[in-house]
Image: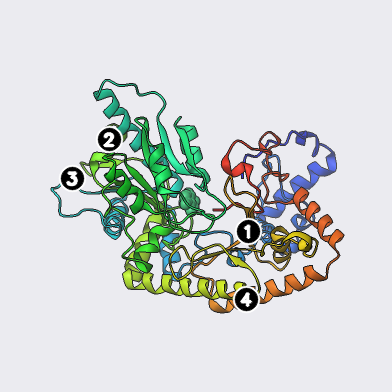
Amino acid sequence: MVHLAEINHADVSTKHVDKAAKKAVLQLANDQDNFTTSVYGSRFATSDLPRDEMPEQEMPREVAYRMIKDELSLDGNPMLNLASFVTTYMEDEAEKLMTESFSKNFIDYEEYPQSADIQNRCVSMIGRLFNAPVGLEKGNGAVGTSCVGSSEAIMLGVLAMKRVWKNRRKAEGKSTENPNIVMSSAVQVCWEKATRYFEIDEKLVYCTPDRFVIDPEEVVNLVDENTIGICCILGTTYTGEYEDVKAVNDLLEERGLNTPIHVDAASGGFVAPFVVPDLEWDFRLKHVVSINVSGHKYGLVYPGVGWVVWRSADFLPQELVFNINYLGADQASFTLNFSKGASQVIGQYYQLIRLGKHGYRAIMSNLIRTADYLSNSLENLGYVIMSKKSGEGLPLVAFRLPDIKGEDEEERSYDEFALAHQLRVRGWVVPAYTMAPHTEKLKMLRVVVREDFSWSRCDALIADIKLCMTYLEAMDKEAIRKTQEFVRMHNMTSSRAEHNHPKFRNETHSIQGKTDKTHAIC
Ligand SMILES: *Cc1c(COP(=O)(O)O)cnc(C)c1O
């Protein structure tokens, strides 16, 4: 979704010119000096909140708080949002620590050396979790940094691969024009941003109706001398399936190619090491040079934190790293943004040491169990399951209605989009979407199983799915068609929605923009 707001050009200055309004403004100022009435008894309760122009006068804090809180109550309930991987629950102690760090600017290493050190501890723990080579000579081990999320982490990973490639080509006296990257058509939109922003060609490996991940052979066939690297996804956003990084690695070995692999483990990085520890996808594979993971997905931290780790400093060209002097020593920094809050990094450290490996393993195993239970229940209701079970992929359930053949086609009057809409009426956010390009005929629904999606909440969802099916089956076909048309026209979450800038409303240049979906698949 493009959240670019357009400035409202309505002439706001003329709105308040009449005398009565001016008087009201003065009265209002007086009110603020002795605000004794209740929020809903004040004049603010009967006027709209300022929208276009910053108000001239202050308003009492209780009013500002209550009015904004009330407005936000129309947002969905994060607990019922099954569309997103992003953390919606943390323990009180974690919240307390994070709140207490709100005022710390993470980049001020000199002022907040402990926060910087805590980041380095997290990088070390995450690097080891991904089997980064340790015990090497000092200065040659794995390096990494915290980011705002996997998107920033991926941008940094891509920049590093591009620069390593460019430096090598220069040294060989060869052209540095037209770098490319090989990746799946199921990549998250941030990969398209990275290639577009940094002017790298995309070489896409397409999914097929029965393969929702890359084909390793096709990937390696696409590699040429301008390939800066290959992206493999540990848990695609569509079906949660892990791409076969080892097969890509082994094929590169076989053909004597030295192409680097970056693993996008945004979701899988904190799942696979605990659920399928024997799966080789990380630095155990020689060609894997960098890995990103979202701390705010299965890293179990509230939004605003991601990580990127490189196998060794050799894969992070010196020119990209800036040294920031702190306490007389240099702290290396490689980020797109300068200032940011320290809370998220501190929250990540809390989770890592509070839960430990055992804690993460316990949570992730439970999520897999819940996902399997949901898969089986949906199968019993007649759905086709498109995601993996038993921890072979992410704890999510991607499912669709069964195929209908020939003359039966008239039989079923609703599709996945209608079901998603019906569930939304009950408060559940379960996105319906079409598969990645070349497979976009496949419609599906996806439920992400997060830490706070308990067994009983899962039962409540299953009961509601049954209810919605009964309702849709009883509904007149024409009525369903009209409802769907209406939803399509007015869907708030669609890129065509009213709150989007008109210039950007019909974005079609991205892989994602071309596909149909009720919600961002992230
Ligand atoms: C979520 C996701 C991203 C983007 O990560 P953010 O942390 O939201 O920036 C990238 N790749 C994959 C596979 C993802 O699931």
The residue under label 2 is which amino acid type? Answer: Pro
Which tag, 2 or 1, sits closer to the chain's start? 2
Packing grade of label 2 (10 A; few <14, some 14-19, many >=20) is: some
For the residue marked with disc 3, what is the amino acid? Asn
Q: Is residue 350 visible?
A: no
Does dot 4 land on a helix, a strand or a loop?
helix
Q: Say which residue label 4 marks.
A: 380
Labels 2 & 1 near each other (Cβ < 8 A):
no
In space, the residues marked 4 and 3 are separated at their CA atoms by 53 Å
**SS class, disc 3:** loop
Helix, strand or loop at mark 1: strand
Say the numbered circle drawn on residue 198.
none
The label on residue 140 is 3
Q: In this view of the protein, which residue sits in the foreground, 214 or 148? A: 214
Q: Are marks 4 and 2 in contact (CB under 8 Å)?
A: no
Give the alpha-carbon distance from disc 2 to disc 3, as whole Å: 13 Å
* Label 4 near ligand 1 (CB < 8 Å): no
> Between marks 3 and 1, how big is the CA–CA gap?
46 Å
Q: Check the picture and name the quadrant holding the N terminus.
A: top right
Which is closer to the viewer, label 4 or label 3? 4
Q: Secondary structure at mark 2?
A: loop
Mark 4 or 2, nearer chain start: 2
Whichever of callouts 4 and 1 sits on the residue coming sooner in the sequence is 4
What amino acid is found at the position of numbered circle 1 in the picture?
Answer: Met
- Res 317 label: 2
Residue 15: give x, y in percent of width and height. 80, 38
Q: Which residue is mark 1?
A: 444
Q: Can you name the residue that lies furthest to the left here?
A: 137
